């Protein structure tokens, strides 16, 4: 759900993302871009681990392997592979637990036998596909465990006639192949009527016709006990597990996973008063407190480095986007996201199901990669353990592509610029960015946005390694010609190598930091603020104002700005940033001593010569101490991304929209009902003077007052050139929660013409009237 941005919480916070202070001309001067000059590259948004239910998300260092992997192989396999009608067959056909068991025990053509199961072959197929990790369904919703489970009510592979540990064989083979090991586990089980009626007082609709029964409450408790025992077994019996993928945390297939947290208790600890107690035989305790551990408490106790998806009821270390839809919209920055989809219609094996074509698979993959996502691609082996030949053949084609073009995928991040849906996108790593041209893009030439202060040293065809002709514009753009669009039409990739890193580097990282005081008893020293990790921090040893943090950059540098990640979100830290060349005479670079901003990450843009940078905290809420997770300092021009927003007009309730989803210069700006389209999404980019650029997510162009235009003329979008006609100030309206959008050059407001409420009404420039058609609500996406 979109969250309205209130005056105190955000718009003042937007000002805190920029510099509003006057600075000494001998040390610092305002950063203004000249028209048609190269525009700076954006910083990669920070990911700050959050805490939920007593468990903190893993650090960037621990999730990096998954971000770098870019592709994993998902394997849905279980008793449902016998009848070959998909993994939901038991529920879809209302097969009773007794009859379903026959697909495991009875020697028929529908029996799940694993007779051809060779997990080393699976691991090789994963490598042939280009995958760096695999995830196996150790137990799906029907409750069958692929390993010998010791819970007395478990239905598992250790029973006759199979008597095997299929999970153990899988883990060994995958690990031996040099791949990361992932396990899938579903806590729900159709074998238990209590799954639909955990209280015994309100049985939910189900295909088996179960009705409310007080005995169901105990039945549900036994189901929960089995889950806790099996999670403990998976986390303790197979060595290091890299990834666990939970699924099916909802109850009775209603609501959400978090809605069911009262039952499963997915956090660090369990409540001793919970109505569905876990027996001591299946329980684990916290070594520090002796309290009973919840699901994630058990997982992290035994696998401290594991990464976890968000489907247990806990928030997860990464986001999950499921299904075969093609990713659209903005880059998933500031977080780790995994796209998962199946190539065979259902997730589990279904006889005769068509396999997704290579072009469709590539469309999902590339559109995920350019949006900074890792992808988990599913195959469904048959009852014997054989991956069908048509599935194997198409994933090997993916591997062939990656063997040729993997440098543009593995270890990259999405960006540095936003993709255009259906047309193109970008990835980058170190000093090279890659242009991914999709089938929807026509032509053999391409022009990039500005590369900022970087110079191009080489442009090449990634598939062949051959050089490509290019020219650079005065605005820093790069035009490439002679691109071969037929060799790999699914993703024609051009590499562009720069003379420096694509992302501006933090020059404070690893430098000597000191502070007025340190919370040494908890290890929160000054050095922790410049160690490059957002999971560590510096803290003062008291709650006083006046505490400072200082970093020595080693020599005098030409600085362009800072980025500070404070300890806590939604907290009003007030502060001043100063610079010095000699550690004696200090000059203010950014004055935020009066800010009401509450954003956790705050960017300041300035120009200065300094060796030392000092942040002094001048104001704090009651009970809050001065504490910084990251102090970053930059010596290259950069732009800071505040976030992506939708702007809603107070008069009409309609949103700011680029007409026709246009991507060309001059595209008209109108109002239109909210559709979720990226042409209605805007990134707010701070300027050095406290104003903002509004960059359209679909086109990458910015909102502007057309040059030389008059009162009443329509606003449009244009390629960013640094002109003040492309800069806007957000002025609080007399109506709380709304703001006027005021152009820096003209001083006129973004106004819905004639106060219209009609779809497609023009957004024009007009002097402030106080009318509701000039008020905009800014909603974070």
Image (spheres, rainbow, N blue to C red):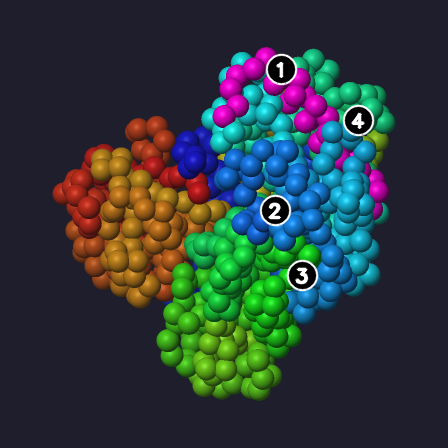
- Residue pictured at 25% horizontal, 56% vertical: 659
Comes first in the chain, label 4 or label 1? 1
Separation (CA) of disc 3 from disc 2? 14 Å
Query: Is residue 442 or residue 647 the one in the foreground?
Result: 442
Label 2 neighbour load within 10 Å: few <14, some 14-19, many 20+: many
Quadrant assignment for the N terminus? top left
Judged by depth in the image, the label closer to the viewer, 4 or 3, is 3
- The answer to whether residue 710 is visible is yes
Judged by depth in the image, the label closer to the viewer, 2 or 4, is 2
Do the residues bearing badges 4 and 3 touch, measured as CB atoms within 8 Å? Answer: no
Comes first in the chain, label 3 or label 2? 2
Relative to 496, does residue 6 appear above or below in the rendering? above
- The answer to whether residue 616 is visible is no
Residue 211 among those drawn in magenta:
yes
Write down the region rendered in magenta: 209-238
Q: Mark 3 highlights which residue?
A: 386
Separation (CA) of disc 2 from disc 1? 28 Å
Q: Mark 1 highlights which residue?
A: 215
Where is residue 320 drawn, in percent x and y?
A: 56, 46
């Amino acid at each position: 759900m979109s969250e309205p941005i209130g005056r105190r919480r955000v718009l003042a916070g937007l000002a805190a993302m920029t510099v509003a202070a006057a600075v000494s001309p001998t040390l610092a001067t305002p950063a203004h871009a000249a028209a048609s000059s190269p525009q700076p590259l954006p910083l990669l948004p920070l990911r700050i681990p959050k805490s939920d239910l007593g468990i903190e998300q893993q650090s960037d260092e621990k999730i990096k392997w998954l971000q770098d992997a870019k592709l994993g192989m998902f394997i849905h396999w279980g008793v449902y592979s016998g009848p070959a009608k998909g993994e939901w067959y038991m529920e879809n056909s209302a097969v009773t637990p007794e009859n379903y068991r026959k697909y495991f025990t009875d020697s028929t053509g529908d029996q799940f036998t694993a007779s051809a199961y060779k997990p080393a072959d699976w691991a090789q197929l994963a490598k042939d596909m280009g995958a760096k990790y695999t995830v196996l369904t150790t137990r799906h919703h029907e409750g069958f465990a692929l390993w010998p489970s010791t819970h007395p009510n478990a239905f598992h592979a250790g029973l006759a006639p199979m008597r095997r540990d299929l999970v153990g064989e899988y883990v060994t083979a995958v690990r031996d192949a040099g791949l990361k090991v992932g396990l899938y586990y579903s806590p729900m089980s159709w074998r238990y009527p209590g799954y639909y009626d955990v209280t015994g007082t309100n049985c939910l609709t189900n295909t088996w016709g179960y009705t409310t029964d007080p005995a169901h409450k105990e039945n549900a408790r036994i189901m929960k006990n089995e889950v806790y025992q099996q999670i403990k077994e998976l986390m303790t019996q197979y060595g290091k597990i890299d990834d666990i993928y939970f699924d099916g945390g909802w109850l009775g297939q209603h609501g959400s996973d978090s809605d069911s947290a009262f039952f499963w208790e997915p956090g660090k600890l369990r409540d001793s008063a919970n109505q569905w107690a876990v027996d001591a035989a299946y329980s684990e305790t916290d070594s520090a407190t002796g309290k009973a551990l919840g699901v994630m408490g058990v997982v992290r106790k035994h696998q401290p480095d594991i990464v976890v998806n968000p489907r247990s009821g806990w928030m997860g270390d990464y986001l999950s986007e499921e299904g075969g839809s093609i990713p659209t919209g903005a880059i998933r920055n500031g977080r780790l996201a995994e796209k998962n989809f199946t190539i065979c219609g259902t997730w589990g094996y279904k006889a005769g199901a068509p396999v997704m074509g290579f072009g469709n698979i590539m469309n999902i993959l590339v559109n995920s990669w350019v949006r900074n996502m890792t992808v988990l691609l599913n195959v469904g082996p048959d009852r014997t353990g054989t991956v069908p030949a048509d599935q194997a053949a198409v994933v090997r084609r993916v591997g062939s592509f990656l063997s040729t073009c993997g440098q543009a995928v593995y270890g990259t991040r999405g960006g540095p610029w936003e993709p255009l849906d259906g047309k193109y996108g970008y990835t980058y790593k170190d000093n090279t960015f890659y242009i991914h041209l999709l089938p929807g893009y026509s032509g053999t030439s391409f022009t990039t946005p500005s590369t900022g202060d970087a110079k191009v040293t080489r442009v090449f065809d990634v598939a062949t390694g051959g050089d490509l002709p290019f020219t650079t514009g005065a605005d820093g753009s790069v035009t490439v010609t002679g691109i071969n669009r037929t060799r790999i039409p699914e993703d024609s990739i051009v590499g562009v190598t720069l003379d420096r890193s694509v992302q501006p580097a933090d020059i404070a990282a690893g430098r000597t930091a000191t502070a007025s005081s340190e919370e040494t008893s908890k290890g929160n020293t000054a050095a922790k603020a410049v160690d490059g990790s957002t999971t560590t921090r510096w803290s003062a040893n008291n709650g006083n104002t006046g505490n400072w943090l200082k970093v020595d950059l080693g020599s005098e540098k030409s600085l362009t700005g800072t980025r500070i990640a404070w300890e806590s979100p939604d907290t009003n830290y007030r502060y001043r940033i100063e610079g010095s060349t000699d550690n004696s005479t200090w000059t203010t670079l950014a004055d935020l001593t009066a800010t009401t901003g509450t954003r956790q990450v705050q960017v300041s843009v300035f120009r200065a010569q300094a060796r030392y940078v000092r942040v002094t905290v001048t104001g704090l809420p009651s009970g809050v101490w001065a504490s910084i997770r990251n102090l970053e300092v930059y010596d290259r021009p950069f732009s800071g991304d505040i976030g992506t927003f939708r702007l809603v007009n107070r008069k009409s309730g309609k949103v700011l929209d680029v007409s026709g989803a246009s991507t060309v210069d001059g595209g008209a700006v109108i109002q239109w009902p909210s559709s979720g389209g990226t042409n209605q999404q805007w990134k707010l980019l701070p300027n050095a003077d406290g104003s903002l650029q509004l960059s359209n997510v679909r086109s990458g162009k910015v909102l502007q007052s057309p040059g030389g235009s008059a009162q009443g003329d329509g606003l449009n979008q244009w390629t960013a050139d640094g002109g003040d006609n492309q800069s806007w100030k957000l002025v609080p309206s007399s109506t709380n929660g709304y703001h006027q959008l005021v152009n820096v050059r003209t001083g006129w407001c973004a106004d819905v013409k004639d106060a219209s409420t009609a779809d497609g009404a023009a957004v024009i420039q007009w002097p402030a009237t106080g009318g509701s058609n000039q008020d905009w609500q800014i909603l974070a996406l």
